Image (spheres, rainbow, N blue to C red):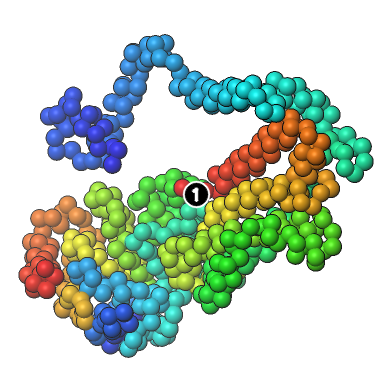
Amino acid sequence: MSARPVIVHALKPQPVEGAGTGPAEESTRLHPAMNQASAAPEKPLYVRTRAPEWLPRLLAPVIGLGLFVVLWAIIAKSGGRLPDPVSTWHSAVEVFSNPFYKKGPNDQGIGWNVLTSLGRVGIGFGLAALVGIPLGFMIGRFRFLSDMAAPVISILKPVSPLAWLPIGLMVFKAANPAAIYVIFVCSLWPMIVNTAVGVRHIPQDYLNVARVLNLSEWTVFRKILFPAVLPYMITGVRLSIGVAWLVIVAAEMLTGGVGIGFWVWDEWNNLNVQHIIIAIFTVGIVGLALEQAMILIARRFSYE
Amino acid sequence: MSERYLQIDKVRMVFDTRKGPFCALEEISLDIHAGEFVSLIGHSGCGKSTLLNILAGLLRPTGGHIVLAEREVTGPGPDRGVVFQNHSLLPWLTCFENVQLAVERVFRTTEKENAVKERVHRALELVQLGNAQHKYPHEISGGMKQRVGIARALSIEPKVLLLDEPFGALDALTRAHLQDELMRIVAATGSTVLMVTHDVDEAVLLSDRVVMMTNGPSAIIGGVLAIDLPRPRERIALAGNRQYVGLRAELLEFLYRKQMREAA
């Protein structure tokens, strides 16, 4: 579609020769014409008169963040107990200058807290992937299983993961496995649902290839089902990690111990609001990093 | 045996739809010789693709049966090579791997890995894609994708090649080029071919016989046209050939005079 205006352009200088030639010849002529246009002498002038394209793209987020900090400073100045950006920055420098200290079970550096939380997310999420992805495959492949699972998933999916915490505490009688279990439950649904949707959306053409060749189930799984579902699965994984990272903070506030969520609650008890703000930014940045990592992985496995 | 290599015997196809039974094929009987190139032509919706899918084993006929080389066809299998209209290459496999998937299925049990790879090479060379073999489908043109599809279908040495409007999605020049290629390949391999098409020129140029189907529902064979033009055929020479023009007119007559009323 996009080639159409270019062809008209390329033919213009030589309309007599161009008349009656097939599209193949047109397209070969199209290239020198395009090269000419791109090598036109005014191109360097554009670069000099206009700012390079990346500048506004880089500037916009900087301005956005700047405005955010200014707004924060204004609110902090106008009274209340919100610490201003500068004092928070100094506090953050101090916190991050020694992130891995240990002064007993309830007083550890922010690095340990973040790592502990990430560890819980990793274990809970990993278990959920082990259960959810195969389950999603089966639900997507077999209609009966899908109909069987649908009511259970529909009812349980909208439940706040924290509602599962008391049951976890009751069953495991310990805070740490209970928190992991909450992560497991909340990571499970997006992975089941997305994997199942992926299996159901495999183009019939691919399955027909498998059928006319009479491929074995195992080959179909390896060569067709799995690669076709992978992008959907990765979306499920991405959503799960996002939810898990949201939930871990809340879960740790309730269970205590070590972890970024507990740290927030602990600093609230200490009335150290600067540390709470530092924790909020830390949680945000780690979440962003997780998300970006998943997007990178997803891009690696997209075939278009 | 050569006379009745592929027998389509009283095949009938009725689909169960929400609005009740829908009869796509009333009763189709057709015998195809070994090494013959037969085209199925008809307006869209006449059930020609349905018939091809039955031959491929993707659909089970409501009645009748199909015998290929003295064995009844009861389901899909690698004794038939299918080329789909939309190439149906797996996008996560290279051209080589797409063909390899088929070759391994058929020859891996009897041949060594090197022999299997050699077969893949040969199939890709046959369609003149030897140097694009490590590209992914999205990196090559539509015509090249269809070539890979043909290579995949031929690589398993099928008893019959089933082509479902193989060049329908291509531009006119690429289509002409691939038709010439197909003629060359079929002549070189001596394949038995059944091709679904709605292109009159394609049917006359490539086929030994053209089977004209009436409009659905309840399609039947409206007539069979023998194309006894000598081979090798050359499209430019044929364009002015009186016999060619006559055959072409006969097909057009069938499609647009006899079948148009119902299609409109």
Q: Residue at x 11, y 68 (%)?
A: B264
**Residue A217 x/y as whole percent:** 57, 71
Crowding near the residue tagged with mark 1, few <14, some 14–19, many ≥20 C-alpha atoms within 10 Å: some
**Residue A281 x/y as whole percent:** 68, 34
Which kind of residue does numbered mark 1 sit on?
A: Tyr
**In this rendering, position of residue A292 left or right of residue A105:** left
Kindly indicate the quadrant of the structure image that contains residue B83: bottom left
Q: Residue at x 49, y 65 (%)?
A: A200
**Residue A33 x/y as whole percent:** 28, 26
Q: Is B102 situated above or below A22?
A: below
Kindly indicate the quadrant of the structure image that contains residue A171: bottom right
Residue sitting farthest toward the front:
A79
Mark 1 secondary-structure assignment: loop
Q: Is A42 situated above or below B146?
A: above
Locate the N terminus of chain B by quadrant: bottom left
**Residue B171 x/y as whole percent:** 26, 50
For label 1, the residue is A303
Q: Is A101 situated above or below A41?
A: below
Q: Residue at x 62, y 48 (%)?
A: A242
Viewer-proximal residue among B195 and B58:
B58
